[in-house]
Image (cartoon, grey):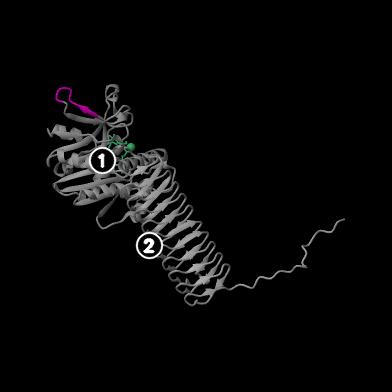
Amino acid sequence: MINLNVVILAAGAGKRMQSSLPKVLHNLAGRPLLAHVINIARLLSPQKICIVIGHGGEIVKQSTAADDLTWVMQEQQLGTGHALMQAQSHLDKDGFTLVLYGDVPLVSIDTLRELIQQSEGKYFSLLTALVKDPFGYGRIIRDPETSEIIAIVEQKDANADQQAINEINTGVMLIPNIQLHSWLPNIGNNNAQHEYYLTDIIGMAVKENIHIRSTHPRNFWEVMGVNNKHQLAELERIYQKEQAYNLLESGVGITDPARIDIRGELSCGSDVEIDINCIFEGNVKLGNDVKVGAHCTLRNVTVESGTIIHPYSLIEGAEIGENCKIGPYARIRPGTKLASKVHIGNFVEVKNSQIALGSKANHLSYIGDSVVGKHVNVGAGTITCNYDGAYKHQTIIEDDVFIGSNTQLIAPVKISKGSTIGAGSTITKDTPEDSLTLSRTKQVSYTEWKRPTKLKK
Ligand code: UD1
Ligand code: CA
């Protein structure tokens, strides 16, 4: 491994985002652009990661701070060369500096490893790309005879011939530190934009007869930057499709790879099927044969094998056992743990509760702060009244309990093993085992009673 410093340029204002949030804090796949770049940098195990901040720098720093990051303030954005000058005192004497960009979030580890590899521990290396429309980019100028890189000319400084060149500078480069330290002080701003161009060091290298290598990214989207929300949305889709394709390749069934969003890590067993418009956030693990219906959101969830999640379910911070049936329209909230063969049906909300083997709550219920035993049947419209306005209380429902529909269980309360609750009851006291408990007035009928009617005029 070479001694590596990474500098991430992130000082730009990002005016075209039309937002008060600094550009590099906008989310792609649920994480800030800058977080993607830092993540990739860390995978290279560098000695140092320096981040050059400017506009909204304090906010960027506060929201991203970590022990392994060095922050450098660039008060005025006078160009990419100027940005690197601000970081110079943090760079090692030898080894290499890899330059990355806070608004170019998808550069891949494979591409960067290739760039590092072909530098062979000594060569200055550029990541360049061949594009149909090079407008706006710095052009790579090569010697017509040797094909060696001899300069980079920015769009605004390029003559007509140079503008026709379709090999462009992606901006990503790996620079030997010894030379970088000698070149940086010599960068001037005598150009069309009066900026200190980092790309001027290419000319300096050539003057010193230093050979420059180059390599291309595997995919062009790896070096696409975000300047506005349109480009952000475009990159989001590219990223999502890429993830979907990887899953498809590994055998996951995805009905439509254009209609899935993974904002974190999704890992799947064999024969998993995911219908359209599902969102996976944080860490989601799906076991073998799990089916996820259309329009579901799963956030930090583990689902064991054979479970079916029907459409429009929202599951968060939960562990779902094997062969469960969830939804449609189920809401499962954090702290929930379902054992095997549990059924949670439509318009059932479960929060911070454990439900044991084979128990069912199929319709219109709220189960909160509860411990539910095995083979319990929770009737439609059952509510655990867990909150007294100040404190949350627990409901315990033991094995083989049957709760009639439209029952309120006023916590703290225990429904003992084998007991049955008659429909429409409000239960305030613990029930004895294997008993029937009701709390409702006896049914009465008044045969003389007449409905009120309007008087005829
Ligand atoms: C730069 C390259 C160009 C390349 C292009 C790729 C130079 C001189 N030009 O041009 O060859 O084709 O990127 O997209 O390097 N930044 C700072 N501080 C500054 C200036 C820039 O942090 O003072 C950051 C910006 O936030 C941005 C990145 O550096 O993330 C690139 O800056 P930008 O001004 O967009 O460079 P380009 O003109 O696009
Ligand atoms: Ca740019």
Quadrant of the rendered structure where residue 154 is? top left
Q: Nearer the viewer, mark 1 or mark 2?
A: 2
Q: Residue at 55%, 67% (x, y): give it.
A: 407
Quadrant of the rendered structure where residue 275 is? top left
Tell which of 112 and 423 is nearer to you.
Answer: 423
User: Which element carries disc 2, helix, strand or loop?
Assistant: loop
> Which residue is tagged 2?
339
Residue segment shown in magenta:
140-146
Report whether the residue tagged 1 is closer than 8 Å to ligand 1: yes
Q: Position of residue 8 (x, y in %)?
A: 27, 46
Q: Position of residue 36 (x, y in %)?
A: 31, 47
Distance CA(mark 1)–CA(mark 2): 59 Å
Q: How many marks?
A: 2
Amino acid at circle 1:
Gly
> Which residue is tagged 1?
81
Q: Earlier in the sequence, mark 1 or mark 2?
A: 1
Q: Residue at 16%, 28% (x, y): give it.
A: 148
10 Å crowding of disc 2: few (<14), some (14-19), many (20+): many
Q: Quadrant of the C terminus?
A: bottom right
Q: In the drawing, what numbered circle is on residue 215?
A: none
